[in-house]
Image (tube, rainbow, N blue to C red):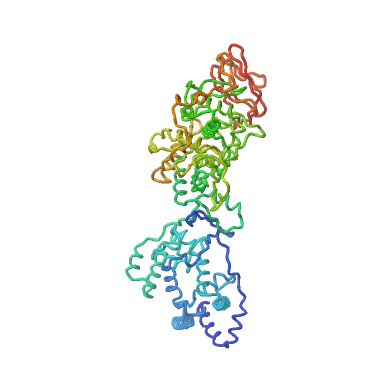
Amino acid sequence: MRAGWLFVLALGLFLAALGRDAVAGWIAATPMPPLAVETSVEVLDRHGDLLRAYSVADGRWRLAVNPDQVDPLFVQMLVAYEDKRFYRHRGVDIRAVARAAGQAVANGRVVSGASTLTMQVARLIEDGPTGTVAGKLRQVRLALALERRLSKAEILALYLDRAPYGGNTEGIRAAARSWFGKPPSRLTAAEAALLVALPQSPEARRPDRHPEAALAARDRVLARVVAAGAIPPEVAASARRAAVPAARAGMPRLAAHLADRLRAENPGAALHLTTLDGGLQQRLERLAAQAVRDHGQGALSIAIVVADHRSGEILAAVGSAGYSADTRQGFVDMTRALRSPGSTLKPLVYALAFDEGLAHPQTMIDDRPMRFGSYAPENFDGQYRGPVTVEEALQLSLNIPVVALTAELGPARLMAALARAGVRAALPGDAAPGLAVALGGVGVSPEALTALYAGLAAGGEAVALHAVPGGGAGTRQRIVSPEAAWQVGHILAGMPPPPNAARQRLAYKTGTSYGHRDTWAVGFDASHVITVWMGRPDGTPVPGAFGAEVAAPVLFEAFSRLKPALEPLPPPPPGTLIVSTAALPAPLREFHPRGAGLTGENRPVLAFPPDGALIETGGLPLVVKIAGGTPPFTLLANGAPVLVATPTRAPALPLLPGHVTLSVIDAAGHAARAQVELQ
């Protein structure tokens, strides 16, 4: 005879043979296995929705669940199908045992089981085998003990936590996520019936592998719960028409990099709450993946940070185009990677200059070749526009005017303003800040740049960005005055949007680092700020990539996925001076840099690299930029000729890593040199 048939007979004889007191003592002495079970670490968004979960130590998905989080329909169907007298028996259903025993004797085989939900819980928490009579008796004993120590709700909670649902999925919450991609509070009748049926044969009834068996088991559940009066016949008829899932939906893995960081910072926590918006995060992750596909660069990556600059809450953080994309180094969280910000620090320079009374948006400033000591910057396009207003200089992202203002302010003042904004700006080695900082000669992360622009958008006060609720408390430092912040924002809002982008008035700035290694776009409206970075995680160049062409369209698209329309920037603060150039006080009508010399065409200047620079070439040739002088040029490295009689002003030199003294000699015999370190 089969063990199950022997069990129902043995159980009846055993219980009859024991006296009441003996049974009570036997139950009271039951060794109780641990009732607590390890559940997955979870990261939730601002609405309490699951962003990411981590499997438990044995590789299983087991999400903690409260019975209140489960659709009552599922519980009704579970009890009606598995144990209709669950709320009346004390662990063992004597009527069911007697019925099963009678059927087994009459048929010579087990026709129906007598296992209650409590007995199933006992089996789930018991380590020993239950396929023998002794194992079944131990299961009965444990079930009776559970009923004495726990309430029905607590026993049901254990079942909801531990029932197997196929593969490495345990518990109703993990099952609803895995099979239907939803929480168990929103199950349909068809979905609930399938999840009632699965734990009886979780592998044989897996809908992705055995759809016919899953369908038949689900329909048997529907038939029985209709007979029990748990659901109306028309509901069951509609449920039978639904297909079973062809594949597992899997667990969500949104904001994977941020989730990893939160878990590393607090490894003992089972639950991590965030300020992120899961729906927005998902939309922007899709945008990020599409953006890198559109550019066809196999190793291209992306970072997107969205924050509410009124509260400092981070609403989305995309660390790469794909967390598992090995060819793109998707595991690297680029929201925190230090990269050259290109021209994106220029608005801060101008805001500081406004506060110092050095300039006004309508102040005229020269855009022509200049030399500041040994540093002779050039505009990105190599052209010069002569006298322009400061407003035009910022909108055109000209280099000479911003370096002239930085020279007047002092690079240390720029670094101090970055620190007040909460920006950790990294300089190569122990180098002192130089004028190149204004053009991106410093390491800044996308998250830090978002904080800087959040401060400008918030009227010049620093905003502490945070992804954990309550993480932004503290006193705000002032970066620049409200008037200077508004003036910069007003200038940036005058920038035309990229081609094919929504014609909305967004205050934004783009940037491209030296060698096209980093492309940026960061912008804000009255409530939100978004930063987009695109490049390669290893720092190798992306030829021909510019922030205005690569990152800016993604920025505008990100805003459209955040909300349907931009919110207009606030009106100017009362103290803002809004006049034409002619109406300005005389000292503000024109800016004349002190200590800057015009670079004559008769003398060459090494515009790049500047003297004392530390440059990461990534194994590629170093592109040198020559201003002034008379071509052709001869270039030397440590006194040895590298390139002779070249007419180009931007030659590429194949140089080995190390300390190098670069020299350039023009056709007239004039020379310039710079000492640099190549890595």
Query: Going by the picture, which residue comes out furthest to the top?
Result: 668
Up-down: is 674 above or below 679? Answer: above
Depth check: give the residue in front, 449 or 320: 449
Q: Position of residue 9 (x, y in %)?
A: 51, 83
Q: Position of residue 344 (x, y in %)?
A: 52, 34
Up-down: is 580 above or below 200? Answer: above
Up-down: is 386 above or below 117? Answer: above
To which quarter of the image does residue 611 belong? top right
Tally of numbered tags:
0
To which quarter of the image does residue 436 belong? top right
Q: Position of residue 588 (x, y in %)?
A: 51, 26
Q: Position of residue 211 (x, y in %)?
A: 41, 61
Up-down: is 17 above or below 91? Answer: below
For this view, does 112 lie left or right of residue 424?
left
For the question of whether residue 295 can be seen, the reply is no
Depth check: give the residue in front, 204 or 403: 403
Viewport quadrant of the C terminus: top right
Depth check: give the residue in front, 585 or 378: 585
For the question of whether residue 563 can be seen, the reply is yes
